[in-house]
Structures are given as structure tokens and as C-alpha cells.
Amino acid sequence: MSKTNTAAQEPKWVQRLLDWYDVNKRDLPWRGVGDPYKIWVSEVMSQQTRIEAMKPYYDNWMQLFPNVEALAEASEDEVVHAWQGLGYYSRARNLRLGVQEVVSNYGGVVPKDRKSMESLKGVGAYTAGAVLSMAYNLPEVAVDGNVLRIYARLYNINDDILGAVGKKKITALVEETLPHDRPGDFNQSLMDFGSSVCIPKSPRCSDCPINSSCEAYANGTTADLPVRIKKTKSITIPLVVGLVQLGDYYLLHKRPNTGLLRSMWEFPSAEASDFSAGESQLKDLLGALGFELKLDSTMVRELTHVFSHRKWEMKTYRGTLIWRGSDAEQIAAIQTKLPADYMLLPRLEFATYTWAGPHGKLTELCK
């Protein structure tokens, strides 16, 4: 459990921030309800995603899975399909597994202590602190990128906030300044303050209600903070993607059930930086399945998609397939001869499948 302060021990900026929050807090559907499940879902959804962008997904999610029992009973495919568009799909899978643990081990009640909370699948220190403080008003800190940035500026901390030393120093400060009576509101005030005032680039210091307590503002170092040293370089992977048809059907591939975008559907692709090399690889790939390929050399879409440690640079082309078997064979018969990770699907049925990241954006090019 985190340390807490009495009102007399609190730095003055803490109350000023809470006063600002009382006037300026965002109206969000999971706030003020005291429902740990709803708060848990909102916190997981908002990781790597802006609040405004995730709100429609949250509303739809609650229609489909209004409580822990409903989510625990859902299949992985149903959960991932509801998540489609948010990315980082392991978040959805882990959320489902964590909720199943709550139903199995805690009688459907989200636990009220940090150790039990962090034992759940996919729940880390930040999510545990957010749920415990916001749902149960327990004195637990929730330290994420927003909080690290705010405190680095408030206390003029020049350590790397992505490193162990910087995180440990700031977490200790958050624990020291956490108010004893409103820990949940305090954590939420930091969320809103970091998204609207103490933003990553060009912080709005003139609008800041606590700038008189900010050491970086006083020292003129707000533009230099926080210090973030990224150690992992993104790998760029060029892909040639084929929107390839057999009549009114498109050929799709299901990604492996482990790794990036696991078990999701995509259009046939080849790692190649130009049309000629990509066409050759796709012909070999689809030829092994029993097709001849005619690929149009006119690119119809160029798309870049960035993951955490890699970047896809995708060049997309249309193509037609010819089945090497009997002309009289129907689609259903051809399907039986394809491997389990391939299928032919008409455009009208695309919406019922979960697409692998940027491949979902390419579906709009299909007729």
C-alpha cells in the first residue's frame, strides 16, 4: 500500500490540482460509478489509445460484455472482434483471461488489494493502482507516462523516465504526495492534467494551475523535460500485399496463433520492397496452394503501420487468381483443398472476421 499524507503534509500544489480537476474533469462513462470492472476496462483500453478515440469502443464493449460474467463467458474470437481497431490485441486477450480469474478465484468480485490485483493476467502496477484508487478509493498510486512527465517537470528531474532510476524516484514522490482523502480523484486529476495542460510537447504552462510550484517552469527547463531515452530501434519491414480474387471471392490468410496479430486474417503478403520481387514471391506462395496469379502492376494503396518495435511499409496491388484444377470445381470444393489457414471469402462477409491491423483498412478497396 502506498504512503499517504494528511492535508497539513500535502504540498500546496496537490489541493490546487484537485480544485482544478473539480472544475475541469472530463465527463467519462466509467467515472463516478465505483465499478471496478468498468474502470479496469477503461484503463486497459486507454493504454496506447487516446480517450476520445476509445470511448466508442468502450460503449460498444459494455453493450456486449456489461459485467465480468459476460466477458468471462465470451470466446476469444468474440472479444478480439469487439476490440478490432484499437490495436495491441494482447490487451483484449489478457483482459478476458484476467476477468476469468476474477470469476473463478474471487467469486466475480474484483479484488481490493494490490497483490491480488497484480496477480491477474495482464494487470500491472499502473492498472492495479488505478482500479483500486478509483473504484475503492484506496491510497494506491497509478504511475504511467503522464505521471512520469508531470513529476519530472514539477520536480525538475533529469533522470531518464524510462529507466529504473527515474521511475523509482518519481514513484516515491507520487507516494509522498498522494492525498489521504482523495487518492482516486488525485490519480484521475493527473490523467486529465497530463492530457490537456502538461502535454508531451509544448506544455501549456500559462494555463497551468500549479506552475508556481513547478521547478522546471521556474528554471526554464520545461522544453527539455522529461528525459526519455529509447533503447529499442524500430525494424522496417517492406511488404507487397495482394488483393487477389477468384471470381467474387478474395483469398485470405490467417496469421499463426502465436506472435504479432495472432490468429487474425490478412491478405496474402510477401516481404519485398518492389513489385517485381513481391510478385515473384506471391506467385510461388499461391502456386503452392494450387493457383496461378496475375498481379496488376499499378499500386492501389501505400500504407505505413507502426507497431511497438517494427514498422510495416505496405504496397498493395490487385490481382486475379486462376484455379489449376477443374474449371467445373465450385468455391466450396476448392476451399476443401486449401490449408486450414487460407480461405476464399466474399466481400460481404468481411465484417464478421477479425482483421490483422492495417489489413482491415485495405478491405475498403475491395469490390
Image: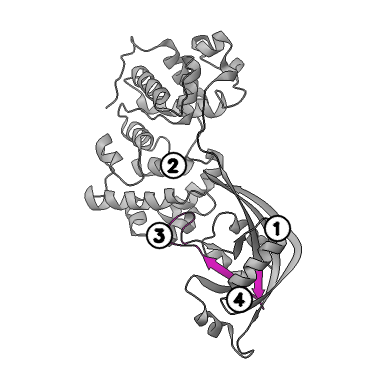
x%, y% of residue 225?
54, 20
User: Is residue 124 visible to the viewer in this orientation of the structure?
Assistant: yes
As shown in the figure, which amino acid type bears the numbered disc 1? Answer: Asp
Task: Point out the frontmost of discs 3 and 1.
Answer: 1
Residue 42, disc: 2
Image: magenta residue range: 244-263
Q: Which mark is residue 76?
A: 3
What residue do we see at 31% from left, 16% from top? 5
N-terminal label among 4 and 2: 2
The tag earlier along the polypeptide, 4 or 3, is 3
Crowdedness near tag 3: few (<14), some (14–19) or many (≥20) residues, C-alpha within 10 Å: some
> Residue flagged by tag 3: what amino acid is it?
Glu
Left or right: residue 298 versus residue 106 is right
Q: Which residue is mark 4?
A: 287
Of mark 3 and mark 1, the one earlier in the sequence is 3
Quadrant of the snapshot with the N terminus: top left
Residue at image mark 1: 274
What is the secondary structure assignment of the residue under circle 2? helix
Q: Nearer the viewer, mark 4 or mark 2?
A: 4
Kindly identify the amino acid type of the residue bearing the numbered disc 4: Gly
- Which tag, 3 or 2, sits closer to the chain's start? 2
